[in-house]
Amino acid sequence: MNSRNFIIVGAGLGGLATALRLSHRGHKVTILEKNKHIGGRNSRVQVNECDFDGGASLMMMLDPFKSLFRDIGERIEDHLELKLCDPSYRVFFGDGSTIYGTPNVATMVDQIEKLCGRDEAERYGKLLGDLAELYRLSIPNFVRRNYNSPLDLVRLDSLKTVLKHHMLSNLSKRMEGYVSDPRLRMLFSFQTMYLGLSPFDAPWVYAVLTYMEYGEGIWYPMGGLSTINEKISELAVAKGVEIRTEAEVTSISGNTVTLVGGEVLSADAIICNNDLPYAEKQLVAPSGSSTNKGAAKERRYSCSAYTMYLDYEGELPELKHHNIFFGNDFKGNLDGIFHQPMGVHDDPAFYCCVSSKTDAQRAPAGHENVFILVPCPNNDYDMKESDLERMRRHVFSRIPGFDETKIRGMVTRTPKDWEEEYHLDKGATFGLAHDFWQSVCFRPDNRCKTNPHLFYVGASTVPGNGLPMVLISAELVEKRLEEANLL
Ligand SMILES: Cc1cc2nc3c(=O)[nH]c(=O)nc-3n(C[C@H](O)[C@H](O)[C@H](O)COP(=O)(O)OP(=O)(O)OC[C@H]3O[C@@H](n4cnc5c(N)ncnc54)[C@H](O)[C@@H]3O)c2cc1C
């Protein structure tokens, strides 16, 4: 096979992993990235001497990470020092009670018994067993594959699996059949928020995320999750990939891209890693049209996040590396994020990460790197400074022992910042929503319908959002390029 020439727009995880795969096969790859740094939503933030992962901080589902390294003849262990976080996280409920999430089944049963009684504890095994089965069936059959048509899904065997395991039933309602205590229902269903999707709106199949945590555990690569992108980028560059930063693409037409400043580049194929709805609306010329605007269909979007990165002098001994804080009205909180009228709740749930608890190098002695993520509405809601202030006050008041006077530096990102910095339409930090009509075979295809030279990789195409899914997306686009005889 002749060597081909590919352009990848965006140096997020999806773009980097695709570049590594293609360069490993001997092809010439150029990545064009608008920002000064690579990594996209999985890149670093620095506040004084504290180092943070700006977006992703939970590493789950190791298999796609291992596959990428294996497929290019490497071993993940030679590039990333992975640690299991056990406990996975500490959970603080609104009523003052706490629990540790852990993949250790005996510890989990013991804690559930103490928190909610014996009946509830005895049912945990059934929940975990059913989730393991759901995971085993859904990942290879529905996630790690390309679809040519929705008809692929209605094949008899697929349909039987969907029906037998109630994959499309409502997640939050179905969880009620496994656990009665409202705290446990939150504990085992909030994971859909990793996709920017409310568990009250999610189909049961997304309970695979709960299995990833409680069946397989949460991992941490020493140096931070951004190290994953950095290592992939190093390997890609060693195989000849050229990465151009501060190289923003303004339009894509046929097999050419135009950059800010007017430079035009062409390739055998273009792979767009910047978020798909933005690419459709802003970059891609509809077939036969002279404008590159307005190509997109009306799509539905995930929520956003207000993130804070604090250089905190002192110790927060009650916190673990990962911490989840629930309020007393989870449903009301999520309704305000996802449904009209949108708004910021008075008692919002949030996530807090202190990676220096595992990796002391990430903060100077006597300091902790405190990262906070408050899920909030996307830019369909006009976020006001008073909303941001309320979220900050709330978070600072809930973290045990937190003393605001010990903050030595703080950087924040609002939904508008996320939109601007990474071209995330509506500031939807998790890309397109994962509702039924935007999941599996209904999620936007990784082939552009109007341009045979253009393909997509990343969180808003198949299979979806999150680091492991984005790595699978790189596997899937490689298969598409093979089908198109481009590899
Ligand atoms: C706050 C937050 C927390 C998260 N937490 C987790 C987690 O704990 N675990 C997990 O697995 N996942 C998590 N995720 C999701 C995960 O980070 C994303 O799914 C993943 O990083 C997306 O990768 P990507 O390659 O699809 O896109 P991106 O990372 O968005 O990369 C796209 C790149 O394209 C560039 N670009 C945009 N427009 C242009 C242009 N016109 N020209 C050139 N370049 C352009 C952007 O600058 C960017 O670098 C989180 C995400 C966020 C935002």
Image (spheres, helix red, strand yellow):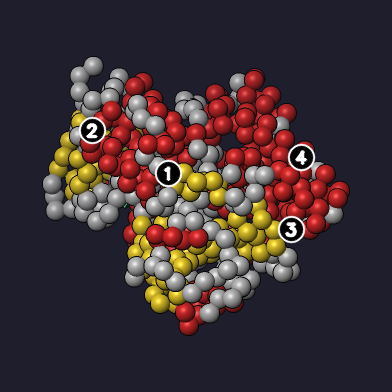
Badge 4 amino acid: Gly
Pair 2/3: label in front: 2
Label 1 Cα neighbours within 10 Å, binned few <14 / some 14-19 / many ≥20: few
Can you say which quadrant of the picture contains the C terminus? top left
**Looking at the picture, does residue 168 appear above or below residue 175?**
above
What residue is rendered at 68% in x and 49% in y? 188
Q: Is mark 3 within 8 Å of ligand 1?
A: no
In this figure, which residue is indicated by the disc labeled 2? Answer: 239
Question: Could you tell me which residue is drawn at 48 percent across and 48 percent down?
Answer: 220
The amino acid type found where label 2 is placed reads Lys
Name the foreground residue: 469 vs 154: 469
Q: Secondary structure at mark 2?
A: loop
- Tell me which numbered mark, 4 or 3, is placed earlier along the sequence: 4
Viewer-nearest of discs 1 and 2: 1
Secondary structure at numbered mark 1: loop
Q: CA distance from mark 2 to mark 4?
A: 47 Å
Q: Secondary structure at mark 4?
A: helix
Which residue is at the front of the view, 399 or 14? 399
Residue annotated with mark 1: 81
Q: Is residue 458 left or right of residue 234?
A: right
- The residue that mark 3 highlights is 183
Q: Classify 483 as above or below 166.
A: above
